[in-house]
Amino acid sequence: MEKMDLKKTLKHLYQPSAKEIVRVDVPEMNFLMVDGEGDPNTSQSFSDAIEALYPVSYTLKFMVKKGEMGVDYAVLPLEALWWADDMSAFSTGNKDVWKWTLMIMQPEFITREMVKEAMEEVARKKKPVSLPLVRFESFKEGKAAQTMHIGHFSEEGPTIENVHLFIENNGSRRVGKHHEIYLSDLRRVAPEKWKIIVRQPMS
């Protein structure tokens, strides 16, 4: 059986160094996505979105593993796009108006029909509240700056500022939405050891 680990295949995107900020070109990829808004620390919809994305992702994984393809691939980490209608909400800490898209990247051989079948199976077994909100879409960021942040979310400020400064120093400007990729299992790893990729699209 063929084994596949896209985090290793796409190492430049999913395993950056924490010692430097680098420029990357992010290709178009397919994701399971759920949109929402509100404080991620207290919002039930944020938790519900996670509880919908993972079951569908793992159902797809086992469909492929047991099916004709016979490919055993690792489920990709949780990712999030962040923004607000008034971006000052991020500096003032008004998390209730934060908007987000939670998403998990899928291998290129996953089709819309396969996603529909997986969602139907999850609906029969678990019925997550936010399952009807899950959608399957392609997403392309293009040029971006990124680095690895080690530690809690609340300590990301200096890392984000350095990424923004890197973009400015390279004669570019920020475009698109703030992007984070959560490599650590936040339920099991101590906060000071969390590994979070901080990515910002640039012109």
Image (cartoon, rainbow, N blue to C red):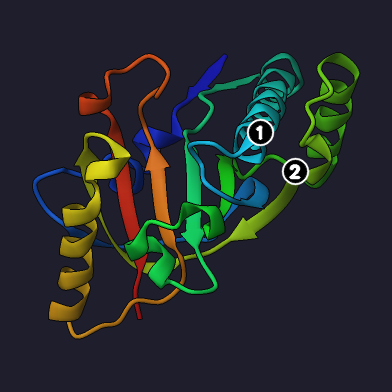
Q: Amino acid at mark 1?
A: Leu
Residue 139 in picture, x, y percent from top left: 58, 60
Report which residue position mark 2 lands on.
134
In the displayed structure, 97 sits above or below 106; it is below
Could you tell me which residue is drawn at 38 percent across and 62 percent down?
90
Can residue 25 be seen at all in this image of the molecule?
A: no
Instruction: Give neighbour class at mark 2: few <14, some 14-19, many 20+ (Cα, 10 Å).
Output: many
Residue shown at 65%/47% (left/top)?
33
Q: Are marks 2 and 1 in contact (CB under 8 Å)?
A: yes
Q: Is residue 44 left or right of residue 81?
A: right
x and y, in percent, of residue 160 in the image: 24, 58
Number of other residues with Cα within 10 Å of mark 1, as a class: few under 14, some 14 to 19, many 20 or more: many
Residue 48 picture quarter: top right
Mark positioned earlier in the residue sequence (2 or 1): 1
Work out which quarter of the rendered image holds the C terminus and state it: bottom left
**Looking at the picture, which amino acid does disc 2 mark?**
Val
Helix, strand or loop at label 1? It is helix
Tell me where residue 201 appears, x and y as whole percent: 38, 68
Q: On the image, numbered disc 1 is attached to which residue?
A: 53
